[in-house]
Image (spheres, rainbow, N blue to C red):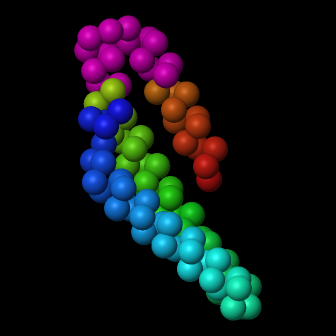
């Protein structure tokens, strides 16, 4: 649902995460200390979480609002709860 989010911003963040993952792979190849690799893994995980938050927020402000205003509120809320559940499993 492209209208739910700022696609340019989300894609930009994803590209940065891809770069972080390539850097982590390079660190493994170069035998960088484990602690340094773990720091970078945590940074990438945090960045991915922020992307998820942006998508979830967009979903709430567009899809959920639209569903409640123009459709079945109970079904829309149930779908949002399921989306939150999927997102919360990321952590």
Magenta stretch contains residue 74: yes
Residue 5 point in image, percent of width and height = 30, 42
Residue at (38% x, 12% y) in the render: 73
Quadrant in the rendering for residue 74: top left
Does 66 appear above or below 9? Answer: above
Does 78 appear above or below 86? Answer: above
Image quadrant in which the N terminus is located: top left
Does 85 appear above or below 45? Answer: above
Residue 47 point in image, percent of width and height = 47, 64
Magenta stretch contains residue 52: no
**Farthest-out residue, top:** 72
Residue 42 in view: yes
In the image shown, does 85 or 15 lie closer to the viewer?
15
Residue 6 lies left or right of residue 30; in this view the side is left
Residue 43 in view: no
Residue at (30% x, 48% y) in the render: 7
Does 66 appear above or below 27? Answer: above
In the image shown, does 10 or 88 lie closer to the viewer?
10
Q: Which residues are magenta?
A: 64-79
Residue 19 point in image, percent of width and height = 48, 73
Residue at (51% x, 32% y) in the render: 83
Residue 21 point in image, percent of width and height = 57, 71
Quadrant in the rendering for residue 15: bottom left
Residue at (36% x, 42% y) in the render: 57
Main SS class of the magenta portion in the image: helix
């Amino acid at each position: 649902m492209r209208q739910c989010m700022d696609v340019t911003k989300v894609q930009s963040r994803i590209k940065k995460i891809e770069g972080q993952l390539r850097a982590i792979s390079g660190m493994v190849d170069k035998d960088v200390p484990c602690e340094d690799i773990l720091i970078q893994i945590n940074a990438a995980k945090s960045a991915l979480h922020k992307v998820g938050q942006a998508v979830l927020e967009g979903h709430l402000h567009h899809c959920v609002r639209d569903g409640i205003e123009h459709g079945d509120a109970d079904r829309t809320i149930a779908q949002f709860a399921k989306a939150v559940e999927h997102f919360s499993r990321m952590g």
